[in-house]
Image: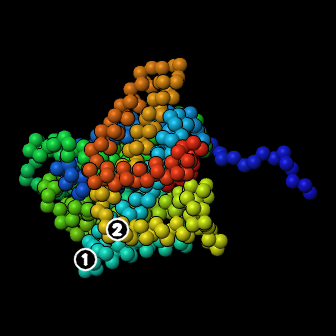
Amino acid sequence: MHKDDSVAPARLRRVLTLWDLVFYGIVVIQPTAPMPLFGVVARQAQGHVVTTVLIAMVAMLLTAISYGRMARAYPSAGSAYTYVGRELHPALGYITGWSMAMDYMINPILCTVWCSKAALNVAPQIPYPVWVLFFAGLFTALNLRGIKASARTNQALTLGLGIVIVLFVTASLRYLNRSPDLSWARFTRPFYDPEHFDFGAVLTGTSIAALTYIGFDGISTLSEEVENPRRNVLLATVLTCLFTGILASLEVYLAQLAWPDYTSFPDVDTAFVHVAGLVGGPWLLHLVNFALLIASVGSGTAALLGAARLLYGMGRDDALPARIFGYVEPKRGIPRNNVLLLGLLALVGGWVISYQLAAELLNFGAFIAFMGVNLAAFTRYWVRSPERNWATFWPPLAGFVVCFYIWWSLRPIAKLVGTCWLATGVLYGLWRTRGFRRELVRFEVPED
């Protein structure tokens, strides 16, 4: 029998509803996202964690509108570098892709640092460098075996973390109910404390707190499998950011009420764990510590996997030396060289980079992408569109301004390191394209 050449190739089916997308976004972000950041943001923003989360939510909501609108224009595309490259200029898309590459490579370091700090709460007798070695090796080993998390595993983890949040909220309310000081000033101080408020410090804290929302843009990667993507991708992205912001604000608000002195955490990187111990006792401390540790191990493994895929795509497209980065081990079908390289980076980074600096570097690249998407949406729907209105004018411009202000509020060390990374990308692009006279390499950034 001869194969029927007239049979159409298989296509992705549009079966995902609006609420399927919202749940997917919540799974990607994780409902406990602000907990690992709590201590670092509290110290940087001088106690105003709730305020930083809410300011970041405004920036993310405006950017979410731009992401949704760009998904209308490119329902088969799903990343910032594509939107920027097509609407603004290929060189700007290249820079956006290079910034996103930094995000992917920093994420395993971030997870290694936090997991090592959380493990110290369980076994403080083991030195921190040993824990870094263990978790960097664990992430590498899991990826060398080709292990990846399934959707059901992610959903089960999200459900478990939701239960932990309910237990923490219940314990916090009971603890506060027994507290002798329940004045009105105590309930408003997490939003605004006149004795310690500094707008610059709050914005710098916001540049870290924005990590709470990182991942919402992943919704747009499912555009080809969504019912009515021109409507549902926009709504789902906005609703996911709104839900995340409200839940995150509740979590950090209760934590601030219970532990208002942001200078007295035993360990700033795992401060939320100690807050849980205060309101619920040792059992809740260990439960929250274990839950966040498991979540971070999953995130670290997935982050290293995504970064390895990114480097492989760059090597396959000859953006990096193909013999090294484009190599796939035949037996397991994995980019082994990339996994080993990223494992080494996670190890060294875990020893020399703090959690705060890693978070800021990740957001350095993310906010460049967010600013680019807002400009791309403004260009397409206001500058070039004959049907202009205020709804296509002010959200992308406001999103760009707020994102730029938050990005500019990053600490100088983060901006210096991030700028060096961008400069390296620009120089590499100049060399690859002989002064940008040839077509720029289009990075194939995988979904997280």
Name the residue at 53% across, 19% down.
Answer: 386
Is the image coloured rainbow, by chain, by secondary structure, or in one colour?
rainbow
CB within 8 Å, label 1 to label 2: no
x, y percentage for residue 16? Answer: 57, 44
Name the residue at 24% across, 52% down.
Answer: 41
* Above-or-below relation of 258 to 87: below
The mark nearer the N terminus, 1 or 2, is 1
Q: Secondary structure at mark 1?
A: loop
Q: Nearer the viewer, residue 73 or 186?
A: 73
- Location of residue 343 (image quadrant): bottom left
- For label 1, the crowd category at 10 Å Cα-Cα, with few meaning under 14, some 14 to 19 and many 20 or more, is few
* Above-or-below relation of 380 to 146: above
In front of the other: label 1 or label 2?
Answer: 2
Q: Does residue 328 appear left or right of residue 57 in this picture?
A: right
Instruction: Give the spatial CA distance, label 1 vs label 2.
Output: 17 Å
Label number found at residue 164: none
Q: Nearer the viewer, residue 397 or 287?
A: 397
Q: Does residue 194 appear left or right of residue 120 in this picture?
A: left
Q: Nearer the viewer, residue 287 or 131?
A: 131
Asked if one can make out residue 409 in the rendered structure from this viewpoint, the answer is yes
Asked if one can make out residue 82 in the rendered structure from this viewpoint, the answer is no
* Above-or-below relation of 61 to 190: above
x, y percentage for residue 101? Answer: 47, 54
x, y percentage for residue 42? Answer: 21, 53
Name the residue at 42% across, 25% down.
Answer: 393
x, y percentage for residue 61? Answer: 38, 37
Q: Which residue is mark 1?
A: 124
Q: Amino acid at mark 1?
A: Pro
Q: Which residue is mark 2?
A: 350
Q: Amino acid at mark 2?
A: Gly
Q: Nearer the viewer, residue 175 or 287?
A: 287
